[in-house]
Image: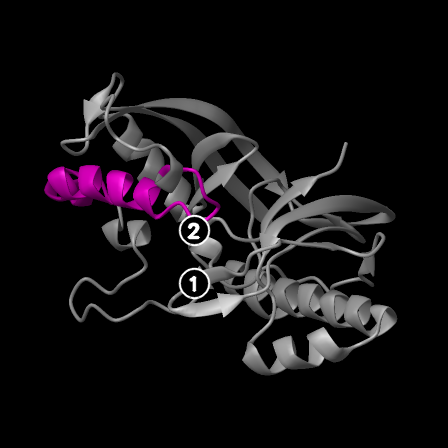
Amino acid sequence: MMISMITYRIIPFLNLDEPREPYFNPGSEWVRDAVKGLMHRNSAMLKEQGVDTSRFHNHDEQTSQNKPGYPLIIYHYTGGQFLVTGINEGAYALSQLMALYPGPVKVSHQMMVYFSMLKESNQEIEAVAEPVIYQLHNYLPLNAGLHREFESAGAMRKMAMLEEAISKHLEKDMFKYLGIDLPVPEISLIDIPAIEPRRQTYKNHQYLAFNLKFSVGLLLPDYLTLGNGKAFGYGILEKVV
């Protein structure tokens, strides 16, 4: 299965008296608000170009209900950069919107933003003989019940629980909804994962967040996401070079 992806870097310009701290977090809601606001300004034009504008917010535009499936536009803060990534139809939607803004644009009373393309790729998702090492950033894999079990488990059980979660999120979420017909090979965690000192709040629930490395015999593109909060960049996946 071929995956088409495009990633834009977002450079914010804030008023001098605007506090910076709220903008620098893994769940970059402000990035989605900025991009979604620009989409709404041009929604009629984008729809004439065949863009499914609901990809920008994952809600049915008639019923306002959440759309099931894997998010095709992901907003994230990764490697010290604010980014927005489009996947398949989301890549087309994002590129059509970004073409309308070649220069800085005002998105609120406090902020202007500038977009520049960072990366564009078409990559086959495939099994490989030699396992590839990946980094997962701010991964939110556990529900409330599994949190309780995890916190009282020994080190080996904790690693097994995280390996099971990664396998499930690949097979029953990413692969299922992106139409990737591949079995998921064995997942192997590399060392005991680092746990973020503060729990992450997502949809009014607090979660343990993990930064971890794992290996798997799959070739996957950077900036796909796993676990809870995927559209906001939790669980960003990057190859370790």
Which of the two labelled residues, at mark 2 and mark 1, occupies the earlier sequence position?
A: 1
Compute the Cα span from label 2 to label 1: 10 Å
At 43% from the left and 56% from the top, the residue drawn is: 71
| Viewer-closest of 51 and 133 | 133
Where on the picture, by quarter, is residue 48?
top left
Q: Which mark is residue 174?
A: none
Can you give x and y, in whole percent of width and height, for residue 208 in the image?
59, 64
Q: Amino acid at mark 1?
A: Tyr
Badge 2 vs badge 1, beta-carbon distance below 8 Å: yes
Q: Is residue 92 visible?
A: no
- The amino acid type of the residue labelled 2 equals Phe
Q: Nearer the viewer, residue 37 or 191?
A: 191
Highlighted magenta segment, given as a residue range: 23-50
Residue annotated with mark 1? 202
Left or right of 39 on screen, residue 134: right
Residue 24 image offset from top left, x and y in percent: 43, 38
Seen from the viewer's position, the closer of residues 212 and 35 is 212
Image quadrant assignment for residue 19: top left
Q: In this view of the protein, which residue sits in the foreground, 160 or 44? A: 160
Q: Residues within 10 Å of mark 2 (few under 14, many from 20)?
A: many
Is 210 left or right of 73, judged from the image as shown?
Answer: right
The residue under the point 66% across, 70% down is: 168
Q: Which numbered dot is residue 232?
A: 2
For the point 70% across and 62% down, which residue is it? 182
Q: Magenta stretch containing residue 47, yes or no?
A: yes
Is disc 1 surrounded by few (<14), some (14 to 19) or many (20+) residues within 10 Å? some
- SS for callout 1: strand
Secondary element at image label 2? helix
Task: Tell how many labels.
Answer: 2
